[in-house]
Amino acid sequence: MSDPSFCRVAGARLSGGNRVRLLIDGPETFAAWLDAIGAATRFVDLENYILQSDATGARFVDALLAAAARGVKCRVVYDWLGCLTRTKASLWASLRRGGVKVCRYNPLQLTNPMHAISRDHRKVLCVDGEVAFTGGLCIGHDWMGDAARGIPPWHDTAIELRGPVVADIEAAFEDSWAAALHHTPPVHEEAPCGGARTAAGGEGVTVSVIAGRPGAMGLYRLEELVAEVAQTSLWLTDGYFVATTGYVRALTGAARAGVDVRLLVPGSSNWPMVGALSKTAYRPLLDAGVRIFEWNGPMVHAKTAVVDGCWTRIGSSNSNLASWITNRELDVTIEDGDLAGQMEAAFERDIGNATEVVIGTSRTWLGKPQTVSGPGDGGPDREPGTAGKRLLSGAIAVGSTLGATFLYRRALRPAESFVVLGGGVALLLLGLALIVFPRVFAWALAIMAIWGGIDLALRAYRLWRSGAAEHGA
């Protein structure tokens, strides 16, 4: 399945001669991360959406402080929104006191509130230029579980990489570090896909790094292309599946062409609205022959794909608009039959702990197939701190459902009843609030208008100044 057009579409570079190791779930992954930090001699670069103030986070804080005490240069990039309610200020203060450089990505800006949509959703660790890790895991107790209480960890996937590709992941970290500091990132020379870097001897596997940035959409283009060219199988695991119409069409087209398309998603969520939106894609997928499985554990949080038994994607990107368009994400693709075989075996084990959704007229539970007359019920994962991201991801689906409700453009499906009900309740509450608190809403509207007006005036002034400077030069 190797094709140079893949990296051109994704804006990535192929790197040959690498070694990879699959890591499953938090206990195994965190042990590998902590071992790498403990063995560091030159530098440690950690970039993660969440570094939580709990026992798991404390282990990483201790490891980073110990590395810094040995003279290792340690840097941490965290996402402001992801850590807003999960991480105490004292954690960052203790790292800084211990010599660790800490930078937060994209805090709220009063002069540009919409800029807060962009989040750093990457999960990256680079050590000494020798080893790098990426995947779907944030750092917190949800990914460790509690064996004593019988609570399994959130199910997730990561990858360890060694070889020339480590330099590409380190370059992606440097780009995030510069973005968080509002600096211009260094320019990294990119070889053409046909001239991919390869380790001496040419042994090992080929890996490409897709370093997603706001507006890039490289992974989205790649995922649609992969769905188009898959020949025999396309197995996806996704924690936040709220796909676009175009991607749903690509998956259904593959299934109708005879490709074995399977999708593993969470079975429960504390975000029922987003869960309902995710399910709106079920019916067209099922009609086309896509097999959908809902995880029976507390959470499946992985973001992976394995195609035709030879190509694998592992990373931080979910199949939704936030990951594809607005976030900083990092995914790797690996061309290796051995790894793809491991991924397929893991997927087969996973669906053994999942409930398959099928078309029918009734529902059964407890591990038996679910049958749905429309899209199913249930929901995606509840990754903390991502309410805004998921609302953005579901905006198109919400608009489609509510638009159909008011304009009678199409027949609604049973699973969309929750969205319609939610819209009705929201309008009722808004109407009652306007009647009871008219002055409050008037003041809020006035403040928003003044805020927006000042923002636009400041932008206009900056543009005028920049133009004046150019003419003066």
Image: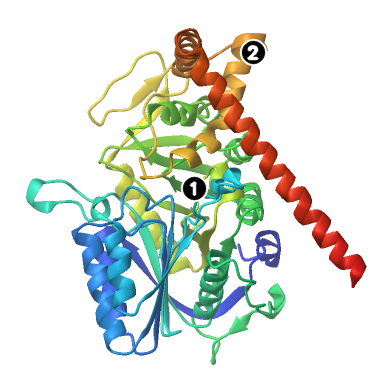
Amino acid type shown at disc 1: Asn
Taking the spot 31% from the left edge, 78% from the top edge, the residue there is 37
Residue named by callout 2: 410
User: Is 114 positioned to the left or the right of 64 in the image?
Assistant: right
Quadrant of the image occupied by residue 238: top left
Question: In front: 175, or 332?
Answer: 175
Of the pair 425 and 100, the residue shown nearer to us: 100
Q: Position of residue 376 (x, y in %)?
A: 42, 24
Looking at the image, which residue sits at the far right?
Answer: 471
Residue 427 location, x and y as percent?
51, 13
Secondary structure at badge 2 equals loop
Please indicate whether residue 192 sits to the left or right of residue 140 in the image: right
Position of 369 relative to 465 (above/below) = above
As measured in the structure, the alpha-carbon distance from the residue carrying label 2 to the one carrying label 1 is: 28 Å
Label 2 Cα neighbours within 10 Å, binned few <14 / some 14-19 / many ≥20: few
Quadrant where the N terminus is found in the figure = bottom right
In the rendered image, residue 10, in percent from the top left (x then y), is placed at: 65, 60
Q: Which residue is located at x 52 percent, y 20 percent? A: 441
As drawn, which residue projects farthest toward the left? 148
Residue at 61% across, 47% down: 112
Q: Amino acid at mark 2?
A: Arg
Per the image, the residue denoted by label 1 is 318
Q: Determine whether the residue tagged by mark 1 lies in a helix, strand or loop.
A: loop
